[in-house]
Each structure stands twice: as C-alpha cells, then as structure tokens.
Image (cartoon, rainbow, N blue to C red):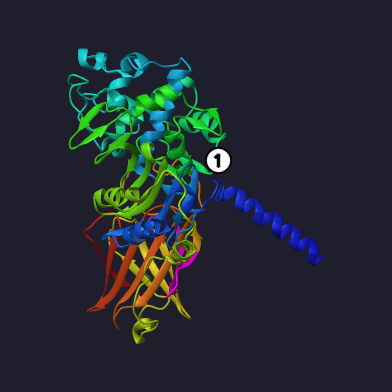
Amino acid sequence: MKKKILCLLTSFLSVCVVSAQTNDLPRSTPEEQGVPSAAVAALFDSLSALPLTDMHGVIVMRHGKVIGEMYPKPYAPEYRHTMYSASKTFVGVAVGLAIADNRLRLDDRVAAIFPELLPDSVSKDLADMTVRHLLKMTSGVKPDWNLRSRQTEWVRGFLAKPVVKPGTTYAYDSMVSYMLAAIVQKVTGMKLTEYLQERIFTPMNVTEWAWEESPEGINTGGWGVHIQPESLAKFGQLILDEGRWNGKQLVPAEWIREMCKKHQEAGREVYGYHIWHCGGHDGAVRADGALGQYVFSVLDKDMVVVMTEATLGNGRDQRRLIWDVLLPTLKDEPLPVNKKDYQRLLKKQASYKLPEVKGKATSSFANQWENKTIELGKNTFGWKSLRLNFGKKEVTMTVTENSGKSYELPFGYQVWKTASMDAYPPYSITPKDCFKGLEGPYWVSGSYAWISKEELQLKAHYVNWVSALEMTFRIENGEVKLQVQTNYVKKPYSISGKIAE
C-alpha cells in the first residue's frame, strides 16, 4: 500500500514538474560557455542592490544554455509573471507569421481590414494608415491610454480617433498593438494565443502561458502576456537564432531580421517592428515592459538575459549592468574551470531573497485587532473590510471586497508564508474586463512584524503576478489608519477605517 501511495505521489509530482515547464532548457557552467562565474554573480548582486527595485527572476543564457538564474524568495521559477509592454514583441512575431502565410502585407490599409467598424466619415489620413505604420508606432493617432478603461469596443474606438499623417510622428501606444492583435485575429481566424501556440510555442514546449483579452474577445496585444521566466528565455533565444528552434525554422529568418532593423527614432532610443534596440550596444534588442520586464537578445554575443521584476526606476541601470558588468567578461572559447567561483555562484543563487518585514512577533496591542472587523472607507483596492487573526508567528488577514467576496492572505514572521487566494491581485492598470483570458489561482506570499508597539506592518507579494503591497496599521483616537504602499506607484495610499461595534 505504501509503495502504491509513493508511486501515485511520484506521478503527481512529475505532472506538476511538467506543468511548470521549468528546467526544460539545457544547463551549463558559465565557464564552459566562455563566461566567468564571478561575472554572473556580480550581475546578480548588482541587480539585487538596485534601489526601488524587487527582482523576481533573472535568467542568463549563452550559446543556448542557461548559465545562471536566480529567483529571490518568495519567487520561484514555476510562477508566471505579467509582462506589460514586453507583450508587444510577441505581437510583432505574430504579424510576421501572418505575412509569411500570405494573410497580410505590411502595406495593407487598416481601414480596409475593418470596413464594418469605420466611422461615418473616413479621412484620407485614416485611409492611408497601414500595418507598417502600426508596427513602427507611427499611426498618426494621438495615444489615448484611457480608451481601454472607458470603452468596450476598442477597435471602433481607435478608428474613430483623429488621424494626422501616418508615418511622420512616433507615438508609443498600446492600443496600436491591440489593433495589430485584432488584425491578426481577423485575417487568420485565430486569437494570438491560438496562433502563436500552434506555430511557435508547441514546438518549443511552452503551454503554461496566457494572454489577457479585451471585451471584444481579442488578445490585448500591447500588454497582458502571463508567462514563466524560462519560457521567456526560449522566446529570447528564438529571436537570437532568427526564428529557428532545434533546427526547425518556426518564424522566417527574413522577418526576424526585418523586425530587428532600426525602423524608427524614438526619442533617445531606436524602435524596430515592436522591438527595441539597446542604446549603447548595437548588437542587442529587447522586449520591454513596464516595471522592468525584459527579454534581451544580445545578437553579437549569442546571449539571452531575462528579467522579471517590479522597479520604479527607468530600467537604464539594469541595462547598464549587463553592458558594464557582464558583456566585457565574455570570451569566444571556454574558460578554465573555476570550481570555487562556480560553487559560490550556486550558493548565491539559492540564497537570494526579498527582505521580510523587520520588527517584533507580538505586541500587547494585538488584542485591539484580534478577529474584529475593520470597516474601511472608499479605496482603490475595492476593499470593504478587513479582519486580522493572530496565530503563533503568523497573521491571517481576511479581506472582504465591495462585491461581498472574501478571501484570506497569509503572513509569516521572519519567513515568507505562501498560499493561493480566490481573488484577483492588485493591478496598476484598469482596462475593461482586465484579467479576462487568465485563469487562477493567484498565489500570495506574506511577511509581518510589529514595527512599533502600536504599528503592525504586513507585506504581500503576489508571486505569480507582479504586484506587492506594504500595509501599515495604526490606531489613532479610536480610528484605524491604514497606509498602503504599492510597488507600482511611488505615493502611498492612505485609507481610513474604524473597528465595527
């Protein structure tokens, strides 16, 4: 009987490992691929020390092999991450596939693809807008970042905007990428998730991913890819190898080269077809998303670097560290074995963690909160009330939303406590039907401490998303004062509340 249970458990764990799709890429020591282990460790240390930044995952590849990776606790390789505008590069690949399938051309006019959604009066500039203009972010439409939060018909809403001379002015706009997603779906009859799954992700053994959808049932294009770091590394390698994977041409090499050309000046930077060039290193391109989501393909060094994180910086420091700390150390041939440095790297990779809340485990003030309902004023998180339950070196916070739905968040003392929750995590953007197309559960890791006798602080990382909240509770004159600092807005939110009688 024990043997049968062990077999079932082993089978279950095997399914979990396959589902997570981790450790699928070949691994190697850095030295075998011409990279000093000490340089990889220095990169990881430097990234971990960046201000206003929580690193969630980093992968370094050389010659198609993973030579270094870190996932600071409570993050782990199996957790997906939302990629914001790094999703745009996936759109660029999908457009190239549609062109290769003779479903689309660069000079196809956008208005001709959606005749049923055009405004009553079509201007010459709207009639002149092409797929190429969308790829270069020169649509001629002034970006309206709130359109997705106000309307449910996004294609019609975009086409109704004034257009001024497409092709003349660069204007970065996620709704432009959404239009490309809608175009690919229109001409192929498949959502981008279906099209890319069939054409590139199944051959690369990537099934654990998803993409948000609009109210119209179209993948959001300019944001919304939800994917694991190792799958991002595969995607970066596909770009690096000009569309080849395991000897098979999944995307035409001509299209990858065309995507990666310098097509458009974008302020101080250069834009390709929905992919960025890396200023300071002409041989590198990148997928780039808000809060520091990156997939770097360093073409002339045969290297891929993936970063998932939450940073309130502009990302230039992360890029500078790759160019200054890592790239100068690369050699074209294997380096002598350095067991000491390699073992130090392995030890470092396993030891990185985000800081837990510092303070005491208990306070005499805990009985003022224990199992009492804290009714909250209006707030951006949609919380109606909270309840705190104190265990031995743990706190459980029960959240009741304005909708009436309740869920629990766990917090450990001097350790990250992780559990799934039956709710959506906080999100820095508010499109209509956000989270449509994604499936839970969502996982949250929490840490707590009493930072003074009267102040309780809780920190929650939504580990298969991107967001984190730092919540500080205090009672003043009989009222509850709650300050919430997110990792996506610099200014904290202040929420007033009271303990229900």
Q: Is residue 47 visible?
A: yes
- What residue would you read off at disc 1? 207
* Left or right: where 197 falls relative to 184: right
**Residue name at image x 40 percent, y 27 percent:** 256
Q: In the rendering, at what x and y percent does residue 364 appear?
A: 35, 87
- Is residue 407 one of those drawn in magenta? yes
Magenta residue span: 402-418
Q: Residues within 10 Å of mark 1 (few under 14, many from 20)?
A: some
- Is residue 417 one of those drawn in magenta? yes
Q: Is residue 437 visible?
A: no
**Residue name at image x 40 percent, y 23 percent:** 255
233 in relation to 103, above or below: below
Q: In the rendering, at what x and y percent does residue 134 appear?
A: 30, 25
Give the image quarter of residue 218.
top left
Q: Amino acid at mark 1?
A: Thr
Give the image quarter of residue 257.
top left
Give the quadrant of the N terminus: bottom right
Q: In the rendering, at what x and y percent does residue 156 appear?
A: 32, 24
Of 388 and 411, nearer the camera is 411
**Residue name at image x 65 percent, y 56 percent:** 13
Give the quadrant of the C terminus: bottom left
66 in relation to 350, above or below: above
Q: In the rendering, at what x and y percent does residue 70 appear?
A: 44, 58
